[in-house]
């Protein structure tokens, strides 16, 4: 039996009430080392809005398809002999690690 087969007897974290959403909206701390707290509502863009996130994602998708064609000679398609759920799950695990790394490295 490994450490992953049973749940811990008590949580291995403590509750930290650092700020309220209202405090955050007034510029309160968004991050406490080792802990993630709620964030304030998003700010409205200035007079000239930046490119939308959706537009950035569309551009990234076009770029990724080009990389796939160059690297593998084809774009991603169904019935390619791979298990898409396993690929996606492994990519999600990597993503979570990169996200947590980025959080830890923020000042």
Image (cartoon, helix red, strand yellow):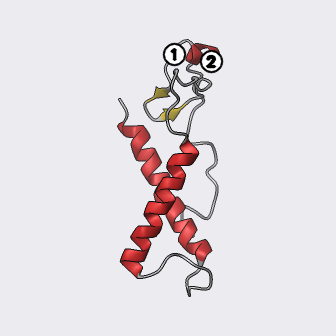
Q: Which is more toward the observer, 52 or 85?
A: 52
Q: Closer to the camera, 96 or 51?
A: 51
* Residue placed under numbered mark 1 in the picture: 28
Q: Name the residue under label 2.
A: 20
Residue 1 numbered mark, or none: none
Residue 59 image point, x, y percent? 48, 54
Task: Please tell me which of labels 2 and 1 falls first in the chain.
Answer: 2
Residue found 53% across the figure and 76% down from its top: 76
Q: Answer above or below: position of 50 versus 22.
A: below
Q: Name the outermost residue toward the front.
A: 48
Foreground residue, 52 or 105?
A: 52
Name above or below for residue 52 compared with residue 28.
Answer: below
Determine whether 106 is above or below 53 in the image.
above
Q: How far apart are marks 2 and 1 (CA)?
A: 8 Å
Q: Where does the image place residue 43, in percent across and percent down from the top left?
A: 57, 23
Tell me the SS state at disc 2.
loop
Q: What element carries label 1?
A: loop
The residue under the point 50% across, 26% down is 48
- How crowded pointer 1 is (Cα within 10 Å; few <14, some 14-19, many 20+) is rated as some
Residue at left offset 57%, top offset 62% = 4
The residue at 58%/27% (across/down) is 39
Determine crowd level at label 2: few under 14, some 14-19, many 20+ residues with C-alpha closer than 10 A: some
Q: Position of residue 81 (x, y in %)?
A: 56, 87
Point out the image quarter for the N terminus: bottom right
| 2 and 1 marks in contact (CB < 8 Å) | yes
- Where in the figure is residue 56, as x and y percent of width and height? 50, 47
Quadrant containing the C terminus in the rendered view:
top left
Q: How many discs appear? A: 2
């Amino acid at each position: 039996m490994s450490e992953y087969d049973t749940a811990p007897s008590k949580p291995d974290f403590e509750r930290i009430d650092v700020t309220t959403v209202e405090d955050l909206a007034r510029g309160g701390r968004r991050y406490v080392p080792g802990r993630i707290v709620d964030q304030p509502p998003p700010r409205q863009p200035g007079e000239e809005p930046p490119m939308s996130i959706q537009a950035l994602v569309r551009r990234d998708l076009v770029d990724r398809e080009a990389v796939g064609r160059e690297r593998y000679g084809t774009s991603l398609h169904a019935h390619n002999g791979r298990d898409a759920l396993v690929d996606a799950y492994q990519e999600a695990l990597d993503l979570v690690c990169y996200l947590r790394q980025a959080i830890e490295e923020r000042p």
